[in-house]
Image: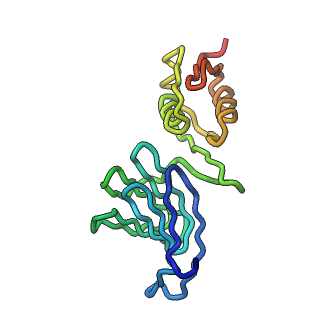
Amino acid sequence: NRKKTREVWLKGDAHFEVKHLNKNEAAINDSEKFLVHVNELEIEVLGTVFNVWNRNGKTEVELESGKVKLRMKGSAKEMLLKPGEVATINGTDLQLNQEKSDLVLQGPDHDKLYNLNNTSVAEIIDLITKTYGKKVMVDDTTLLSRKIDGVLPLCHEKDLLFALSGILDIRVRQTDAQTWVFSTAD
């Protein structure tokens, strides 16, 4: 409906590319607005490209281009993001991160890729748990402190497991629907 505000209620992660409808940034009509609602956060889009990650009560918003205004519902707290900036929202706490997020959405289908930069296997296991809800067991605990660089695919479990087994030279097996076991290759 072109007479009302465009709105999305989000649970999970999303990549947005929102087209400018307004001609005058100082006077935006309701029909030109695009709002994203995530938990207690409202994101007002001012024509832009951005990513939202929403997991375990924590939300991150990363602005690629354009502008977004973040506002906590029922509060005067708000923040304007510039391209390249990331905001973290934990409950009602809204803060600007100094570092860019390692999670990026890219490719024609916005595949989720995780940029590894001296990242420990323990951190990767934490990411797997948050992303897939899987329990990961490690036969050799020395594996947890190993660190790697590169890009890890997160869209498909099989791609993720194949990449990890090759990068780390480990064997990955699934013991049941919710449990993966990493063991050092023989």
Is residue 161 shown above or below 131? above
Could you tell me which residue is drawn at 62 percent across and 26 percent down?
Answer: 168
**In the visual, does 43 lie left or right of 32?**
left
Give the total of numbered labels.
0
Q: Is residue 146 left or right of residue 152?
A: left
Q: Nearer the viewer, residue 84 or 77?
A: 77
The image quadrant where one finds the N terminus is: bottom right
Place of residue 97 in the rendered image (x, y in percent of width and height, measured from the top left): 39, 55
Q: Position of residue 68 (x, y in %)?
A: 46, 69
Would you identify the image quadrant in which residue 158 lies? top right
Q: Is residue 72 left or right of residue 18?
A: left
Residue lying at 65% horizontally and 22% vertically, measured from the top left: 169
The colouring scheme, among rainbow, by chain, secondary structure or one colour, is rainbow
Q: Nearer the viewer, residue 125 or 134?
A: 134
Residue 172, percent across and down? 64, 22
> Between 79 and 121, which is closer to the camera in this rendering?
79
- Compared with 183, 74 (above or below) is below
Give above or below for 90 relative to 171. below
Q: Quadrant of residue 3?
A: bottom right
**Above-or-below relation of 50 to 154:** below
Question: Residue at position x 47%, y 50% from top?
Answer: 54
Regarding residue 151, the answer to whether it shows in the image is: no
Return the residue found at the far right.
108
In this orientation, does residue 147 appear?
Answer: yes
- Residue 38: x, y in percent? 44, 57
Image quarter hosting the C terminus: top right
Q: In this view, which residue lies farthest toward the top?
A: 186
